[in-house]
Image (cartoon, rainbow, N blue to C red):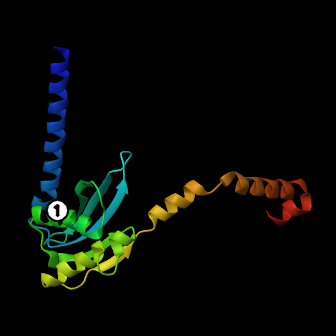
């Protein structure tokens, strides 16, 4: 009996979350009409089960120049994560929201090979789709947040702090040095 109630609550909660997500997503596109121009930011990372998760963020501008920024879509990729694999998900999200490729003005990625490859990367495939729809090639930006995060994880700050602390203590220990820094 208890497991049926628990299962029902989990199903109900899951349905509520999906309904809320759909509602928020539709608000982005229904607020003041259709999105006229937009830019995308793509992030691909791997979760704890070694499944690639792709996040697509959109910044849209409507006819009255009101800007909105939301998570457009998130999907999992099992197996390979080539530019073509990621592009299929982006293309599906664009089509679901009835967006026109020619209105895409900028795309931002993490700069990985599958994202920024010259011929087969997501950026190349997106640029080709934009040009095929009559638009001009979108501005391409590469984000360095991932590299910054990795660098921050690998740095041993204790050595840096030891040097800073010993320098400050040296300066404070001698009055002449201390007065020069005031």
Tell me if residue 103 can be seen: yes
Q: Nearer the viewer, residue 54 or 119?
A: 119
Other residues around mark 1 within 10 Å, as few (<14) / some (14–19) / many (≥20): some
Q: Quadrant of residue 124?
A: bottom left
Say above or below: 2 vs 167.
Answer: above
The x and y percentages for residue 138 are 26, 80
At mark 1, the secondary structure is helix
Q: Quadrant of residue 55?
A: bottom left
* Residue at point 17%, 67% (across, down): 91
The x and y percentages for residue 85 are 24, 65
Disc tally is: 1
Q: Quadrant of residue 131?
A: bottom left
The x and y percentages for residue 21 are 18, 47
Q: Nearer the viewer, residue 65 or 85?
A: 85
Quadrant of the rendering where the N terminus is positioned: top left
* Residue at point 91%, 62% (across, down): 176
* Residue at point 16%, 20% (across, down): 5
Say above or below: 25 vs 121.
Answer: above
Q: Nearer the viewer, residue 163 or 167?
A: 163
Q: Which residue is mark 1?
A: 93
Quadrant of the rendering where the C terminus is positioned: bottom right
Q: Which residue appears farthest toward the front when viewing the image?
A: 79
In-image side of 90 versus 169 (left or right): left
* Residue at point 24%, 54% (across, down): 75
Tell me if residue 97 can be seen: no
Q: Which residue appears farthest toward the top when viewing the image?
A: 1
The x and y percentages for residue 175 are 90, 58
């Amino acid at each position: 009996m208890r497991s049926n109630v628990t299962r029902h609550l989990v199903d109900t909660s899951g349905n509520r979350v999906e309904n809320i997500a759909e509602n928020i997503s539709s608000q982005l596109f229904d607020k003041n009409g259709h999105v006229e121009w937009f830019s995308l930011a793509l992030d691909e990372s791997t979760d704890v089960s070694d499944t690639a998760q792709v996040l697509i963020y959109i910044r849209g501008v409507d006819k009255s120049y009101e800007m909105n920024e939301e998570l457009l879509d998130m999907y999992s990729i099992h197996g390979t994560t080539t530019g073509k694999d990621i592009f299929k998900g982006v293309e599906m999200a664009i089509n679901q929201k009835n967006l026109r490729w020619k209105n895409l003005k900028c795309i931002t990625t993490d700069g990985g090979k599958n994202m920024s490859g010259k011929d087969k990367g997501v950026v190349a495939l997106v640029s080709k789709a934009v040009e095929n729809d009559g638009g001009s090639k979108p501005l391409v930006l590469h984000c360095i947040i991932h590299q910054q995060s990795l660098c921050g994880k690998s740095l041993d700050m204790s050595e840096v702090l030891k040097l800073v602390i010993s320098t400050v203590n040296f300066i404070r220990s001698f009055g002449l040095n201390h007065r020069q820094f005031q």
